[in-house]
Amino acid sequence: MFNPRSLKGIPMFQKLKTIKMKAVSRGKYVCRFLASFASGGGISSLLHGRLSMMADRDAILFDAVNIDVNNTCNLRCRFCFNTFEDRHYYMTKETFQSILPIIPMVRDAEREGLGIYLSCLYEPTLSPHFFDFLELIPEEGRRKAFFTSNLNRPLKEEQIERMLRANLHHINISIETLKPDRYQEICSSVHFDSFRSNLDLLEKVYSGMQGPKPLLRFITMVLNCNRDEIIDIVKFCSKELHAYEHELRTPYISVYENMEWNRGQLMEADECRRLEEELAALHIAYVSDICPKDMLVTAGGPEQAEPGPESERNETAHGDPERDETVYCDPERDKVSVGESSKENETPQENDRLARTERALEEMRLCMNQEFYFLRFSASGVCRLNATGETFPVPPEGDPAAFYRKILTGQYRRRAQAFVWNFAPRPSRAKRIRMKVMFEELKANGEYLTLRGWCRAGADLPEPCMLTLSVRTGKGQENRFFTMEIPRPDLTGSGAGFYAVGFETCVDRTLLSSSPARLTFYLTSRQTLEDVWEYRYPHEIYWR
């Protein structure tokens, strides 16, 4: 009979410390498994199911930094959700230079970040210092930075060349139409000739330029009034303007001045499908965020879509569970709110505990805002945390790099603490349950571990429950954490009695004495905060 311990004598296995395996579901990263070859363990650690997982290392970085070098625009596009201040601001060179030390603290696309926006909501070429600013950006920042322009301001060839020589990662160019009369209707400008002249000049300089240069990316709003020329615009940008990618998107509908006009520009679902088919047939690189009218507008009026690079309407499900009919957890339907149906004779202590839990859950939701690690610098000299609205003056007193690092680590620390259940749940009388848990992301930074995935259990829940997590280290420390539940209609089981949900949680590293840790998942009553079901995850979690 084969004895895996006998492999210990082979030199190859004496040197081998770890085995890493990747499991991929729908093309998405799931997790890395680590089998430790401890003394006397060898492959038997793997064969007997004592499989462990190693968290990937992650850096503490801002996901995005937006630098508005001005707050003005020379167009008033009818689809634009922006509001413009009466007072115009243009960022000074002193302020811009004081921002540059933040560049190493910004996550780039290779690390799943969004980089550095230069006046994404305004027209940056209107700033008197814009071209100087581009040349001040150090090399490390250029591969993270981009800007968006409508190219409506008359530009000289020398300015176009300076813009390209800066060698940012890419330049976004808005192009809604190639027809003068339609340009005036959509963009509220009679200066189509200036726009077209700049496009021709851009093509001339870009084609004749040697050495590194930025990628050119074009953005077109999909409207009923320009539907007949969208394919021609995409072809033109690809063939004549060296486009590496073309983004097509529906306007973000909100309550603003041109709301009625915008509602009339949204296409029906059938027309959206036809356009997608035509675009796919071009075999040209494009990104689509095209939404039909019935998805954005309800009978009561427009539903506000949050503007941003990661619109919720682009969300896709991950994981690859079996297909079947199932009742799944929907946090919007079953809002994680505690104590709503609790008994009227709850004691004051119990009511206080429920209230404290609800406040903690609200803080957790805030800290999981997709823009929690976004920092925005205004042209007037103020930096603002997007999610919380906190503001700070710029330039800061003292060392700017230390100032930005303090803001950054403070945000990470706040998220780490937001998931901690600081007061212990009621004594657990939970019943054991079989559960399928799949991790899609397992990362560790200096402040917390990120665990994201999905779980499915054949539990018949008599009352609304929330998913919570217990983490126990080898030294016996045990702490409890909330999880952020995520709708996952793709998760299925065999029958309506299944509980299925996506989740994400952050585990505060200051509460973990040492690696590894063991996990126990609980389904906890939202009404009484008692644990109803528990599942002990069979594998250990390691981190470095």
Image (spheres, rainbow, N blue to C red):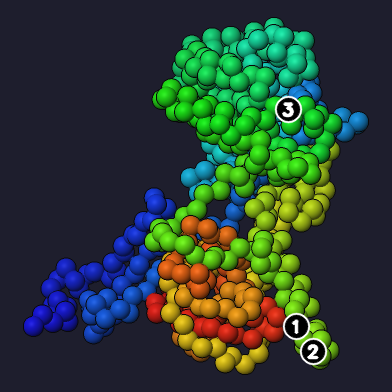
Which comes sooner in the sequence, label 2 or label 3?
3
Are dots 2 and 1 in contact, CB under 8 Å? yes
Q: Is residue 201 left or right of residue 92?
A: left
Can you identify the residue that label 3 sits on?
A: 264
In the picture as drawn, the residue positioned furthest to the right comes out as: 86
Residue at 62% across, 35% down: 292
In the image shown, does 308 or 8 lie closer to the viewer? 308
Q: CA distance from mark 2 to mark 1?
A: 7 Å
In the image shown, does 130 or 465 lie closer to the viewer? 465
Q: Residues within 10 Å of mark 1 (few under 14, many from 20)?
A: some
Q: How many marks?
A: 3
Can you identify the residue that label 2 sits on?
A: 346
Residue at 49% across, 17% down: 235
- Residue 146 appears in the rendering: no
Q: Is residue 197 left or right of residue 492?
A: right
- Residue 362 appears in the rendering: yes
Can you identify the residue that label 1 sits on?
A: 342
Secondary structure of the residue carrying numbered label 2: loop
Amino acid type, mark 1: Ser
Instruction: Give how far across and how far down residue 127 sits, in percent.
Output: 77, 25
Residue at 50% across, 69% down: 496
| Quadrant occupied by the N terminus | bottom left
